[in-house]
Image: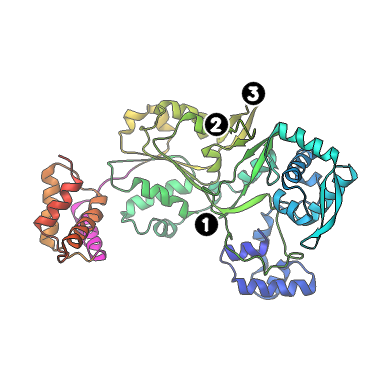
Amino acid sequence: MRFSDLLVALELLSRHDVNDALERQSLSGRPLGEVLVEMGLLSARQVNELQEGLPAPPDNLAQLGIEARIVFDILVKFLSTAGHGTTASIAETLAISRRLSSVLMEQARAQGIVELKPGIVAGELRVELTPRGRSMAVEAFASNAYIGPLPVSLNAYSERVRQQTIRSETIVPQQVAEAMEPLAIPEGLLAKVGIAANSGRSMLLYGAPGNGKTSIAERMVRMFGAMVLVPHCFEVGGQIVKVFDPSVHRRLGAATDRATSSSLLADEFDPRWVACRRPFVAAGGELSLDMLDLKFEETARFYEAPLHVKAMNGVLLIDDFGRQLVRPEALLNRWVVPMDRRIDFLKLHTGQSFQIPFDQLLVFSTNLSPRDLMDGAFLRRLPYKIHVHGPDEAEFARLMLAAAEERGVAYSAQAIAWTIQRIRTHGTALAFYQATEIPQQIADLCAFLRRPPIADEQTIDFALGNLLVD
């Protein structure tokens, strides 16, 4: 993503203002940041804060921070598959600047790997592999079948994770309240959640089902506003590990129109990194220990990062804790060192182990008793244990009235009292989900019967008959 697109994605400037600045930049040739300050669109401090944290686009192979062999291997595999390439297609596929793409093509020509071919594609000369290049491609495919953005080094990735740690942001009460909307959460619980999230340390949400534990955890990532950079992949021991996952990572500026940006003068950062919101990853009953290890693709011979690496610098929710395929103590044993020292160790199929940061807000959610799930030593490693309790009768009534009004259901005070009495008689505790689900079921019933949506004994009993189990 270009710096100009990033400003639009972060909603700091409109696309119109950015295009005006790019036009001025094309005439003056000065850095875009200086033009923005001169136009009064951003302060010098804002520009510096944004640009200081962005890795500069590499101008040569040495600045990529990885072995040249890896670069040329991916290049020849791409050309072998595509048949030919141009500066633009190589730059796009390998996630490098056109400037570096030109340098790479010249070096490949000098080594006899590629040759120029007659014909022009989209205004550019095209290249194809030489017999030597095709031989290199066969060897490269034997190592792995990865074709895509060049990896960053493990050191660069680890350093970037430390720079954008989840602990670097300070959360205020207003951010917590806004993130939790439209949930009806008592102020005391909001404060506990905010303090725990602000610490960046592990937490446990526990309590009876139906009171919003999962909903609270899912919204925690909204408290954090900072952008994070996620690499497409990183390299370790000559192996490639894919990190960026479109199903997990929300790319900033994915819908921006780049056609109006200057392709030659716009300020860019290293395109091997993807600008994203802080990620949120959830795992429930399907979680197993092997999902916390590198996944080696036997056919393609490269790796997919595990769940907690994809959640790096974000929020990782272990939902329905205690109901996984793996025993709770086995899962907790796996994370004893990461939770204490904030580092983890992963192992390649070659047997080589390497260290990687463990930086995410780790949230466990359960409706089971914490003491039945873990012993005192593990409870100590979860510094924030937050009981998410059900509503009292007044809270239940307020929420039910609001839910009924939203769904167009007439719900009198007498009907609410009858609802509460019926739930109590059944021996079931009041829960927040009941207050929203009962008016919805009454609305559904009345729509089916083509009668006015009114909460009375008949419609309430119908809804409770669906919710409460005998």
Name which residue lies at 39% across and 32% down. 324
What amino acid is labelled 2 in the image?
Asp
Q: Are marks 2 and 3 in contact (CB under 8 Å)?
A: no
Colour convention of the picture: rainbow
Residue 291 location in percent, x, y?
50, 33
Residue 257 location in percent, x, y?
62, 66
Q: CA distance from mark 1 to mark 3?
A: 39 Å
Residue 337 location in percent, x, y?
53, 29
Identify the image quadrant of residue 457. bottom left
| Quadrant the C terminus occupies | top left
Q: CA distance from mark 2 to mark 3?
A: 13 Å
What amino acid is labelled 1 in the image?
Gly
What amino acid is labelled 3 in the image?
Gly
In primary-sequence order, the first of circles 1 and 2 is 1
Q: What is the magenta range? A: 387-407
Asked whether 427 or 95 is in front, the reply is: 95
Q: CA distance from mark 1 to mark 2?
A: 29 Å
Query: Total marks drawn?
Result: 3
| Residue tagged 3 | 351
| Residue tagged 2 | 293
The correct choice, above or below, for 229 with respect to 33 in the image is above
Is label 2 in a helix, a strand or a loop? loop
**Farthest residue, direction top:** 351
Name which residue lies at 24% across and 53% down. 437
User: For residue 225, which numbered disc appears in the image?
Assistant: 1
Does the magenta-highlighted stretch encompass residue 362? no
